[in-house]
Image (tube, rainbow, N blue to C red):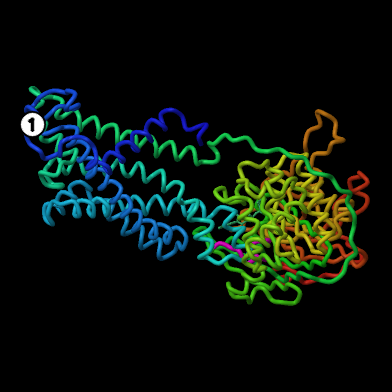
Amino acid sequence: MRRRAGLGFWLAAGWIGLILLAALLADLLPFARYDETLAGPPQSGPSAAHPFGTDGLGRDVLSRVVYGARVSLGVGIGAVLLGLGIGAPLGILAGYRRKAADAVIMAVNDVAQAFPALVFALAVVAFAGANLRNVLIVLGVLGVPSWVRLIRGATLTFAEREFVLAARVLGTRDRRILWREIVPNVAVPAASYAFIGMAVVVVAEGSLAFLGLSVQAPTPTWGGLINEGRTLMETAPHVVLAPSIAMFLTVLSFNLVGDRLRSLTDVRESGLEPVRQAAPALPATTHPVRDVLLQVEELRTHFVTPRGLVKAVDGVSFTLERGRTLAIVGESGSGKSMLIRSVLGLLPGTSVRGGNVYLSGDDLTSCTAAEMRSVLGPRLGTVFQDPMTALNPVRTIGTQVMEPLRVHMHLTRRQARAEAAELLASVGIPDPVRMLRRYPHQLSGGMRQRVTIAMALSCRPDVLFADEPTTALDVTIQDQVLRLLHRQREERDMAVVLVSHDLSVVARWADEVIVMYAGKVVERGPAAEVFARPRMPYTEALLQAAPRLTDPVHHRLRVIPGRPPDLVDLPEGCAFRARCAYADERCEAEAPPLFEDAHDRRRYACWHPRGRAALDGTTTAPSSDVMDITEVTEGADGGGR
Ligand SMILES: Nc1ncnc2c1ncn2[C@@H]1O[C@H](COP(=O)(O)OP(=O)(O)OP(=O)(O)O)[C@@H](O)[C@H]1O
């Protein structure tokens, strides 16, 4: 900040400091009191004895401007604190709780904001009496609607950010999320708006004083001084100029400081250089299958929207064993993220969830919010797509990594700090003790993702969910992060659920794969098998659409024709049929169930599964002969067949 604030900011801050100091120490300053008449000859210009001259009654103008600052700044600061004190809790409540609280608060707020503020202030002060207390209360209360709007907007923004979701994933209580994650972030725009708000109040108080509706004579206020000097403009212009310039500079300075503070505290505008570090690479190894950790049965996540029911996840089932990595792939919008959020119980309010999720036999779908808090973090960890938004920008890495350790493991501050440093070291972060003191924007993308992995691992979860953990990173870092996840899986003996667009990632690091289309599982099986011999034409098309390094330079990428179906209005039969080269009448009439191949644990939802011939490169006519298959009733389609 010191480096980038600029001269204007420091001049403005200096002026505010000077005027504040003068107002506070006015009684000690070596000039006549503001109400001492004939301290000098009336209407005399600036002189050594009276640097700003004297007014019509021979009073010292400098003294009156300095004492006037007491009222103007006092009202400015007091009214802003009052407005903030009332507006901030209401704004946070509306933005965080949403629903009825939001609707009621914002309806009342909109009505309040519709009143013309100055006219309202005039009426109230004229009715209740023109004194300092009334002016302060009226201007403070008039500022409340703007504060509510600002704080609600900021809360809404931060409540949707991934670091808040990450805190919820770590099982943090709402009150703690509010105080630790949202309030510090909301404080940043609030602080900059407070300066701008003070400028507004100083002008408003000046306007009331000019009309004689603020503090009464002989106490001077800037607006009152301007009013008094108005009649002397031709004979003694300094009487009106001195308070006008003081007010102008103060209002300008408040605005400048507020605006500059906003841009300085905005991480995106700070322009600070990230620290780039390389991490050691590790060879990949495989792990033997042991016991079933996660069992998902007929999971459904539907959204009630004005257009109709969106079936984002529709009857998905799978199991996951300890020491295995399950990958979920599919086009954008196929339901991958919603599937994970559904398992974690972190769904938006407009959704409805059905089916069951068992973690080591415990039914998570019947858990209360409080019970889920003890599962999220200690038993289920999550790594998000963009590490920048998954970390709270105003808290150090140390406080964020220590948080779950203190909440769930009940470690003391000192123990948590030592454990946090160890965790950072274990995910390949060099100089972890120093790193604990850094802020997220001071780290490179790869380092930030290592920090979020460290946080997710801090309570030693049984299953780690990684939702596109490398999408926001460049390719060289992607590989390091995936190796790290793999190594941690080995060392900590956990299971990993990996969502990825990148099929090469999945092929390399996953043991099992689920292919999703329009909210359903359309193919499932061992990753190597599925990619070597896809049964479902959709999987085949996905693989063909993925670019390979071995492709010739001007090779045209193959795309899957058409678009994914509208989830509100799914077609009859197979959802992929409109884009499928092998579709026939049966695909149009009847949705295929999820078949199970008796030989190799493969499952696929297709009437015309692809065979070896197609993989060898020879095109075969779509065949309806499926050998050795047993139909399993899985998913909504299976049941409806
Ligand atoms: N709040 C919501 N209201 C209505 N529909 C929603 C809502 N959130 C998600 N959806 C729908 O759910 C479907 C699945 O979304 P999801 O985010 O799981 O897709 P995805 O496969 O993870 O995509 P991407 O790879 O782009 O993240 C989408 O079609 C989306 O339109």
Between 41 and 351, the residue placed more toward the observer is 41
Horizontal side of 332 relative to 268 (left or right) equals right
Rendered residue at 79%/65% (across/down): 594
Q: Which residues are magenta?
A: 340-348
In the picture, the quarter occupied by the C terminus is bottom right
Indicate the position of residue 45 as horizontal and vertical percent values.
Answer: 13, 23
> Measured from the top left, where is residue 33 in percent x and y?
15, 39
Taking 433 as reference, is 456 above or below it?
below
How many circles with numbers are drawn on the protein? 1
Left or right of 67? Residue 284 is right
Q: Position of residue 428 (x, y in %)?
A: 77, 48
| Left or right of 280 on screen, residue 402 | left
Looking at the picture, tell me which residue is in the foreground, 234 or 337.
234
Q: Residue at x 88, y 62 (%)?
A: 626
**Is 343 in the magenta?**
yes
Crowd band around label 1 with a 10 angstrom C-alpha radius: few (<14), some (14–19), many (20+): some
Location of residue 569 in the rendering, given as x and y in whole percent from the top left corner: 60, 58
User: Is 81 situated left or right of 224 in this image?
Assistant: right
- Secondary structure beneath dot 1 equals loop
The kind of residue on which mark 1 rests is: Gly
Q: Quadrant of ligand 1?
A: bottom right
Point 42% across, 60% down: residue: 94
Q: Is residue 481 above or below residue 310?
A: above
Asked which quadrant contains residue 407, the reply is bottom right
The residue carrying mark 1 is 58
Residue sitting at 33 percent across and 52 percent down?
A: 81
Looking at the image, which is closer to me, 144 or 5?
Answer: 5
Tell me if residue 434 can be seen.
yes
